[in-house]
Image (cartoon, rainbow, N blue to C red):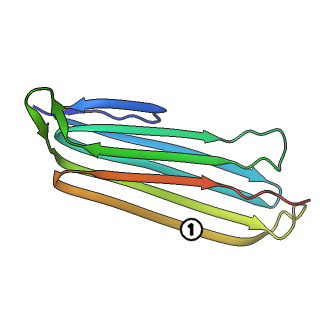
Amino acid sequence: MKTRGVVVIALVMCIALTGVAIADQITSTYCQSGSCNIVQAGSKYDLTVGSVVTSADNKFVGADATSPVTLNYAINVKPYTIPGQGAFPAMGTVSAYVKAHIQEGRTSNNTSRNEDLTYIESSSASGIINVFTQIIAFQSVKVLP
């Protein structure tokens, strides 16, 4: 019997799985005069057996506009180990993704958009999974005066 669940944001999660479907997502938004960056990272897994560790953190508030915004996300799926019985490979489906929409102005006091970049990347594995690791990191650039 499978159990399904959703995790909207998880800072640290470690679960030994026996038939669980879970989704993680973390979003970081940075908007300042002339720029607005939105970055999302997350994962989804539906496993009959396996061990999953996810971690997520972001920094979106700083002392001033020169402090960069960061987003970090990681997922690691590996075999489930039972002491004395050995390791059982993860079985099922896992995927991880990052989506970014970067909008920049020409200068810090210009509110018109000069750059508009959209980026999407995803990775997935299905079947018997010995290892699935995805590490995603984003850092905004320092805003110059």
Where residue 106 sits, quadrant-wise, is bottom right
Q: Nearer the viewer, residue 89 or 109?
A: 89
Residue 136 on image: x %, y %: 49, 53
In the displayed structure, would residue 111 be above or below residue 131?
A: below
* Left or right, residue 17 beside residue 38: left
Quadrant position of the C terminus in the picture: bottom right
Please, what secondary structure does the residue beneath circle 1 have? strand
Residue count near mark 1 (Cα–Cα under 10 Å), binned few <14, some 14–19, many ≥20: few
Q: Residue at x 56, y 68 (%)?
A: 118
* Left or right, residue 104 beside residue 44: right
In the displayed structure, would residue 101 be above or below residue 78?
A: below
Q: Residue at x 19, y 56 (%)?
A: 126
Q: Nearer the viewer, residue 67 or 43?
A: 67
Q: Which residue is mark 1?
A: 118
* Left or right, residue 123 beside residue 72: left
Residue type, mark 1 in image: Thr
Residue 34 on image: x %, y %: 81, 61
Residue 48 on image: x %, y %: 14, 39
Q: Residue at x 60, y 62 (%)?
A: 101
